[in-house]
Each structure stands twice: as structure tokens, then as C-alpha cells.
């Protein structure tokens, strides 16, 4: 794996990334555009050794070789804005314990057999090897050993609620650490056998996003514009690859709030009536001035819906993950997105609240 040519690979990716960002050249320093290099000077052995001494562990080989070519990186895909230098990398729990706690509370198994004296170490793994040690298209990103979150190394800044992590709890025979694409909007992480494998997958994701963006531009330019050229802003927007695309290949998640009005929102967005108003023909004021707005549409329950797509050799496989916020219960609907199943499950969650209304009891929300 050490024979991988990081210099050539990163030079090519850098040129293609910069070309895709030329609609917004102000986002990059002029020197970067001129050099077509999104990286930095490579780290010295002394810098890498200092980082390893601070962390108390030797870094995995492919990541070490990457750092020797560039000590940090400006952007990979729309999800990650910056990879850290040797001076900035840190254990995930040092800066983001709140993130870990929130994730474990939402997705973790309350019956985990934790050894509290061991910093969250498990007596037995929360996910079996048979379910966990699967990589590639057959991987289920929700099969994550949450106990590892206390021991992973963050190597990037937080992008679109996502981060790159390296996991020293799973090491290959040649010393590579498992690598994670960990997102706040994923029920787990897209995992890879090594940092190198993750970067190759991220490059493929970038190429696919660029191709999709180009197709969108072509389709937009072929549509008939209005007399006032009202479609032009959409054409320009669709070409902004690094700001508006939110889909990933192979653990692919299409961020639904970009495609639909109010899907998979953040906690703050759930409370935003403005987002709802933008997706309807009524303003907020008009909605609440109607009888329906005042009475019939009382708050019974809240849901988030996340759509996932992954590419298999046999074709694209899709599923939906629906979370009922009040009870924190989750329904996974796959391998096809069956709208009837989705609606049926949501109605099942609503029925108790509806019954309480019919009997005169107060609903939970």
C-alpha cells in the first residue's frame, strides 16, 4: 500500500476540483488557483513523529504517506471542507464529546455491557464481527460499534455535519486503521479498510457528483426559458458542485431537504415554521388564520425521514429510515422505497394520539 502514488493522485484530484469550483473562484486564494494545488507543503518526519508522540500511537501507513505529500488538504467533496494537519489532528472525544453522547443516546444500545473503568470499552463488541467486518457495497452503515467513538481520531474539520475519522481499534495486518466517513445525518458511518481506500472512494464520489452536476446543467440549458430568463438562476445554481450537491455513492445519502421541502431537518429546522411555509401555497399567517390551521392541524407527532441509496452491481438499492421523534423509534423500509409502508408506519405512530383526541384526552404533543 505504501507504493501508492499520492502525489500523482492528489495532483489530478486537485486540478479537477479547482476546475469544478471556477463558478466561485473567490472561494479559493489566487495562489491556489494558479498552482492548481489544494494541498500544502508535505509534513516532515519530525512533524509526524511529534504528532504520534502526542497521540501515543504510530499513525497508519497510508495516512502517513498522505501527510508527507501534503500536511492537510482544503476540500475533497461537498461534505468535507478541510483535512487537518499533523498539528490539528486530535482524538474525536477531546473536541466532540457532546456529539458522541448525542449519537450514542440516539443510536446506541442501552443494554451495552460497558466496562466503565475502561473509558467506554466493551466486554463484548456491540456488533458481531460477522455484521461489522463488511466493507464495500454490502456494508450496512448502521452496523457501527458505537463504543469505538471514544477512541477514533479526527483528521478533518466538520463539513456538512460530517467528519473523517480513523479507528485504531480495527487494524489490518499491514498496520492500516479502519477509516470512517461519519455524518450527523447517517445512522452510523461509511467505513473503509484504510485511509487510502476511503480517499479513493471519496474521489469516485466527487467524479459522480461532478457528472450529475454537468447533466443537470445540460438538462437545464435545454429547457425553454421564460421571457424574463427566470430559469437562469437555477442553471447557475446547479453548476455549483461544491455547494449544492448532497449525495454520496456507496453509503449514499441524498439530503432530502435539498430535494424536498422538509425532510430530515435538523432539530432547529423542525421548529421552523418558515421552512414549512416555503413548501406550501399559504403563508404562516394565512395558515394559522384558518380553522384548519387553528384546530385540525394540532401537533400530534414529529417525524424525520432519511432516504439512502447505494449502488450495487445489480443496480441501485434504496431504503428509507423514518424516526418517530416522540418515542425515538425507527423504521427501516427497504430494499425499495415503498411509500405505502412508510405512510402505514407513520399512521401507526399517530393512532394513539388520534385516539386520545377522540376520547378527549390530551395528546402527548
Image: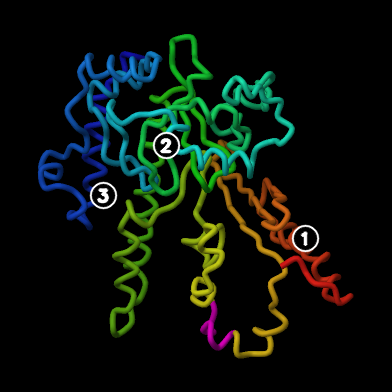
Q: Which residue bears the numbered disc 2?
A: 95
Residue at 65% of width from left, 60% of height from top?
303
The disc label shown at residue 349, or none = 1
Q: Which residues are magenta?
A: 280-287
- In the rendered image, the quadrant that contains the N terminus is top left
CA distance separating discs 3 and 2 = 32 Å
| 2 or 1: mark nearer the eye | 2
Q: State the image quarter where residue 53 is shown.
A: top left
In the picture, the disc for residue 258 is none
Mark 2 / mark 1, whichever is N-terminal: 2
> Residue 335: image x %, image y %?
67, 46
Q: Looking at the image, is mark 3 or mark 1 earlier in the sequence?
A: 3
- If you read the primary sequence from the N terminus, does the residue marked by circle 3 or circle 2 appear first? 3
Q: Nearer the viewer, mark 3 or mark 2?
A: 2
Residue 102 or 195: which is nearer the viewer?
Answer: 102
> Looking at the image, which is closer to me, 33 or 215?
33
Disc 3 marks which residue? 20
Residue 284 lies in magenta, yes or no? yes
- Please say whether residue 346 is one of the residues in the magenta stretch: no
Answer with left or right where residue 224 lies relative to residue 273: left
The Cα atoms of the two marked residues, 3 and 1, are separated by 45 Å
Disc 1 crowd, CA 10 A, few/some/many (<14, 14-19, 20+): some
Give how far apart the Cα atoms at labels 2 and 1 are. 37 Å
Secondary structure under the numbered disc 2 in the rendered image: helix
Tell me whether circle 3 and circle 1 mark residues in contact (CB < 8 Å). Answer: no
Query: On the rendered structure, is 166 left or right of 71?
Result: right
Left or right position of 135 against 220: right
Residue drawn where x is 21% and y is 38% of the image: 38
Secondary element type, mark 3: helix
**Nearer to us: label 3 or label 1:** 1
Q: Position of residue 98 (x, y in %)?
A: 51, 42
The quadrant holding residue 57 is top left
Amino acid at each position: 500500500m505504501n507504493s501508492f502514488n499520492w502525489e500523482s493522485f492528489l495532483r489530478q484530484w486537485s486540478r479537477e476540483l479547482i476546475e469544478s469550483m471556477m463558478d466561485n473562484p473567490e472561494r479559493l486564494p489566487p495562489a491556489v488557483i494558479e498552482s492548481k494545488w489544494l494541498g500544502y507543503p508535505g509534513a516532515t518526519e519530525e512533524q509526524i513523529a511529534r504528532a504520534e508522540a502526542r497521540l501515543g500511537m504510530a499513525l497508519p501507513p497510508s495516512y502517513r504517506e498522505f501527510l508527507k505529500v501534503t500536511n492537510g488538504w482544503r476540500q475533497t467533496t461537498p461534505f468535507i471542507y478541510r483535512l487537518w494537519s499533523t498539528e490539528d489532528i486530535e482524538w474525536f472525544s477531546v473536541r466532540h464529546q457532546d456529539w458522541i453522547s448525542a449519537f450514542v443516546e440516539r443510536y446506541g444500545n442501552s443494554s451495552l455491557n460497558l466496562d466503565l473503568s475502561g473509558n467506554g470499552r466493551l466486554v463484548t463488541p456491540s456488533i458481531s464481527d460477522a455484521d461489522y467486518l463488511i466493507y464495500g457495497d454490502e456494508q450496512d452503515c448502521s452496523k457501527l460499534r458505537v463504543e469505538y467513538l471514544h477512541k477514533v481520531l479526527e483528521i478533518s474539520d466538520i463539513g456538512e455535519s460530517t467528519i473523517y475519522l480513523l479507528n485504531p481499534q480495527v487494524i489490518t495486518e499491514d498496520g492500516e486503521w479502519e477509516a470512517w466517513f461519519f455524518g450527523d445525518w447517517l445512522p452510523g458511518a461509511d467505513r473503509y479498510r484504510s485511509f487510502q481506500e476511503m480517499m479513493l472512494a471519496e474521489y469516485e464520489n466527487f467524479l459522480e457528483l461532478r457528472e450529475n452536476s454537468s447533466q443537470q446543467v445540460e438538462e437545464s440549458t435545454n429547457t425553454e426559458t421564460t421571457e424574463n430568463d427566470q430559469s437562469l438562476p437555477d442553471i447557475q445554481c446547479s453548476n455549483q458542485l461544491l455547494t449544492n450537491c448532497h449525495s454520496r455513492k456507496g453509503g449514499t445519502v441524498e439530503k432530502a431537504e435539498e430535494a424536498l421541502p422538509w425532510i430530515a431537518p435538523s432539530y432547529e429546522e423542525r421548529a421552523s415554521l418558515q421552512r414549512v411555509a416555503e413548501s406550501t401555497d399559504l403563508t404562516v399567517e394565512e395558515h394559522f388564520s384558518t380553522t384548519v390551521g387553528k384546530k385540525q392541524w394540532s401537533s400530534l407527532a414529529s417525524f424525520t425521514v432519511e432516504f439512502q441509496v447505494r449502488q450495487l452491481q445489480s443496480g441501485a438499492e434504496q431504503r428509507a429510515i423514518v424516526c418517530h421523534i416522540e418515542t425515538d423509534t425507527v423504521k427501516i423500509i427497504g430494499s425499495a422505497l415503498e411509500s405505502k409502508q412508510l405512510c402505514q408506519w407513520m399512521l401507526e405512530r399517530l393512532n394513539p394520539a388520534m385516539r386520545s383526541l377522540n376520547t378527549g384526552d390530551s395528546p402527548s404533543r
